[in-house]
Image (tube, helix red, strand yellow):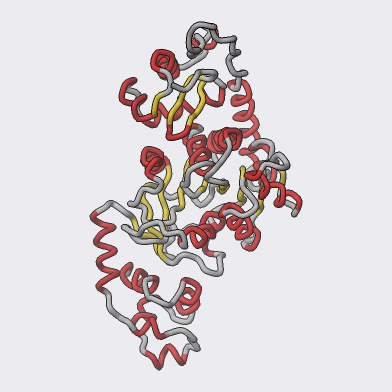
Amino acid sequence: MQKFWVWLVTRKGLGMRSAYQALRQFPSVEALYYADEAAYQAAGLQRYAPLLDKDLWLPQEILRRCYDRGISVLTWQDSCYPQLLRSLEDPPLVLYYKGKLPPDNSLTIGVVGTRAASVNGQLQARRLGYSLGRCGCTLVSGGAKGIDAAAMEGALTGGGHVVAVLGGGVDVVYPRSNRRLFEEVVWHGCLLSEYPPGTQPLAAHFPVRNRIISGLSHGLLVVEAPEKSGALITAYAALEQGRDVFAVPGSPGVKTCGGNLNLLREGAILVRNAVDILQEYEGPYPDLVARCVQAQQELDARAEPALPETPPPAAEEPGPEPIPQTVLDAMSPEEQRICALLQARGNMQIDNLVAETGIPAGQALAALTLLEVKGVVRRLPARYFTLAGAKCK
């Protein structure tokens, strides 16, 4: 029963690795629960004192919260538990999630990077995420600002399955700016955590959850990361787990790219586009490479150069330049409505764009991502968007 699994992982002072080792010494988690001190000693357990606490109030309270908040519970013994995680030395014995778990037969690629990403790094993350999602891969990331969010947005736009592994409860939105993104992830993938509902995202949780990001992935891509970052912790965890590690080449001297350069020097696979990743899995997934090549060609065809800038009038403030009719004709109706509003209003937050255009949030986010890839729209801090070349008001 689930309450015994939750009991096991909530024993203070036990730790995930010790819990897993204790479980392997008994035929079931129920047998582990009902065992006494003599049985623990006979099994050779070193740290069994936390297991002597048999109180089930907290596990039952956690399961009640899950039921009330629409959160699913997955245990290590369940048939749908991800097979990739079973090979870890310290697998999460209980997972909480909202949404739909990825199919076990899908190719899963983890994408990580710095929160303080450059504009180019975020664009690369979106483009790579889009291509991976478009060709049918599952994208796993950490749900943070910067590279994580950009990659997930790209994958959702490409129609891919996305898994966000969180450092707190799946009912706790962190950062708050990702609320709409998380809502989209629940519809097209899942929010996943080993922490029970209501758990705040403490700093100590993130290095621990990184092993799940890499553990769920066949390969891990680092888009942009400084020399000391959580993304590199995840990359080294991936290496220890026997996963492939990929890195986008960065510019020497740019602090946010230092970790990428170190990984490439240590043997990481260099990535220019998603095809470089998929080629490594052509044997078990032969159809994905062809689909990825097609997706990359579509993306390259859409990535038109940014609109040319003209010198501003001498006597007045420069504003957005009109979009050429040939560019407008190639846009979807949603893209045209968004561009018309940005043309009239200047830079706007995504929430206001959704409210004033009447376009559903998921479709608006998809349209904005493609407009950004085309070079028509530019993303600003705090989830603002503006036309490329427009002066921020």
Quadrant containing the C terminus is: top left
Image coordinates for residue 93, horizontal then vertical, percent: 44, 67
Left/right placement of residue 18 relative to residue 235 reads: left
Compare residues 103 and 360 and report the one nearer the observer: 360
Compare residues 117 and 237 and report the one nearer the observer: 117
Which residue corresponds to the image point at 48% horizontal and 34% vertical from the top-left? Answer: 159
Is 391 above or below relative to 56?
above
Which residue corresponds to the image point at 42% horizontal and 53% vertical from the top-left? Answer: 192
Compare residues 269 and 284 and report the one nearer the observer: 269
Quadrant containing the N terminus is: bottom left
Is 383 above or below relative to 44?
above
Q: How many marks?
A: 0
- Residue 98 visible? The answer is yes
Which residue corresponds to the image point at 61% horizontal and 50% vertical from the top-left? Answer: 220
Is 131 above or below relative to 341?
below
Answer with the quarter of the image where residue 256 lies: top right
Is 171 above or below relative to 223?
below
Which residue corresponds to the image point at 48% horizontal and 13% vertical from the top-left? Answer: 319
Hey, which residue is sitting farthest front in the picture?
Answer: 315
Image coordinates for residue 246, horizontal then vertical, percent: 66, 47
Image coordinates for residue 146, horizontal then vertical, percent: 51, 41
Answer with the quarter of the image where residue 96 lies: bottom left
Left/right placement of residue 98 relative to residue 137 reads: left
Image coordinates for residue 335, horizontal then vertical, percent: 44, 19
